[in-house]
Amino acid sequence: MQRMTAGPALLALPILILLGACAGPVADRAFQDIATQTEQQIGQRPVWIRDEKDEQAARQTLDRLLAKPVSADDAVQIALLNNRRLQGRLAELGIGAADLTASWRPANPGIGFSRLQRSGEVEIERSFSIDALSLIALPLRAGIEARQFERTKLQTAGEILTLAAQTKRAWYEAVAAEQTARYIESTRETASVQAELARRMYQAGNWGMLDYAREQLFYADATARLARSRMAAAAAREKLARLMGLWGDDLGFTLPGRLPVLPAKPREAGNIEAAAIAGRLDIKQAQAELDAVRKAYGLTNALRFVNVLETGFVRKSEEGRSDQVGYEIRLEIPIFDFGDAKATRAEQTWRQAVNRLTDSAVDARSAARETWLGYRTAYDLARHYQTEILPLRQKIGEEMVLRYNGMLVSVFDLLADAREQIADVTAALEAQRDFWIADTDLTFVTLAATNTGR
């Protein structure tokens, strides 16, 4: 007996196999789409390292970027080039492409052969069978897998944007931490001079124990501040290095000495909620998931009763007799499993996807409003320190020096003013850092989810 599919399904088989034969180009095209979109959004292009040639090119680019002080954009480019977690995520595109390729391939056919002997007669059966239902449902299943692949693309693009946001934020934190540590170090040197002066004045009998102890406490406190600031700078630098995927000799990279200056004007808010709804990749991902579930729900209902359907051409040969020809159909009968459980599960999965999409939209709107408020507040606060507090603090310091030279104030007043100046300068640096972090958040709030790991 021989079974084989007939008609258009058999003729379409070579075409389907040919369409599913090239997973590599599918992954390549997907990555190029993601890379182009990322470059349009943030001006940086990710790199997918897949062979030794790519490794060498990446190393050359990395050496060039690390040969000079690393800017914020340089840090993002290094992360998109060298972060191994991202490279692992990009491999998901290859896996998804392989799954998409497999979805276009029907189940392998089966071949059977048997030889029976009875009363000197030999009976031979030959069979060739293929699951006809898999051919019928092939376009539907391939469409579902294609939508799953699109979701993988969106997830990959979202992780790229998340890494870019994390890296840029970490760069501002690292630069601000190093700048603060250098300022604290200069104040400690001043405190050291003051402590030595206090010691001599105390030994000469010109100062009492209270004044002497105050200056020693100021010096001790400055030493503790310096240790904490150095630790904070080292931690911020390590965080940035992790995101950029650096280790070994590459850890000797340098950063600019100061944060960028504030822009003359803050950004306009515009319709930031609409921009978040239209641009956020997590919303697009939720939409793709909803569409995929909807299609899968329809397929489940269509096939809930038919689980196995095989058809084929039959040929039977017996010794001494002419061959018999015909056809054979096998169909499962839904006696025990009517498919109602699968249909219910699919419907509830669809409703779950609807609620997730709605929740993502609500979250995107709220995050956009909150991020804009944080950005504007951070800008106003940083500008207030630069235009109001620090200039006033400088005027007070200059006036105190004049009064001290005129013997109108004591050295204690002069030193007390120096202590207050430390707090104001440190707060101004923190405000400037917070503004640039808020600026980064505002850039990415309309592109990806805001959970970027501060």
Image: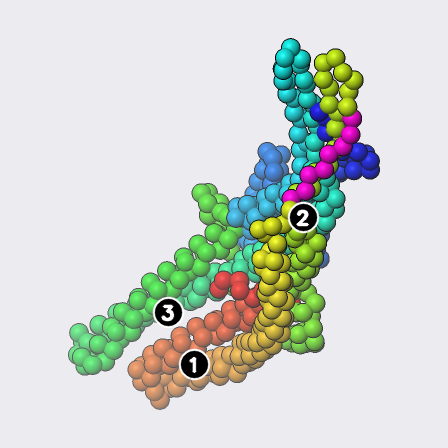
Q: Residues within 10 Å of mark 3 (few under 14, many from 20)?
A: many
The amino acid on which the numbered mark 2 sits, given as a three-letter code, is Val
Instruction: Determine whether the residue tagged by mark 1 lies in a helix, strand or loop.
Output: helix
Q: Can residue 331 be found in the magenta stretch?
A: yes
The amino acid on which the numbered mark 1 sits, given as a three-letter code, is Gly
Looking at the picture, tell me which residue is in the foreground, 144 or 233: 144
Q: Which mark is residue 397?
A: 1
Seen at 53% across and 62% down, the residue is 452
Q: In front: mark 3 or mark 1?
A: 3
Q: Marks 2 and 3, how far apart in space?
A: 80 Å
Looking at the picture, tell me which residue is in the foreground, 379 or 441: 441
Q: Quadrant of residue 164?
A: bottom right
Disc 2 target residue: 306
Q: Quadrant of residue 445?
A: bottom right
Q: Which residues are magenta?
A: 325-332
Looking at the picture, tell me which residue is in the foreground, 216 or 153: 153
Seen at 58% across and 37% down, the residue is 55
Secondary structure mostly seen in magenta is strand
Residue 74: tell me if it is visible.
Answer: no
Where is residue 301? Give x, y as percent.
68, 56
Instruction: Determine whether the residue tagged by mark 2 lies in a helix, strand or loop.
Output: loop
Q: Earlier in the sequence, mark 2 or mark 3?
A: 3
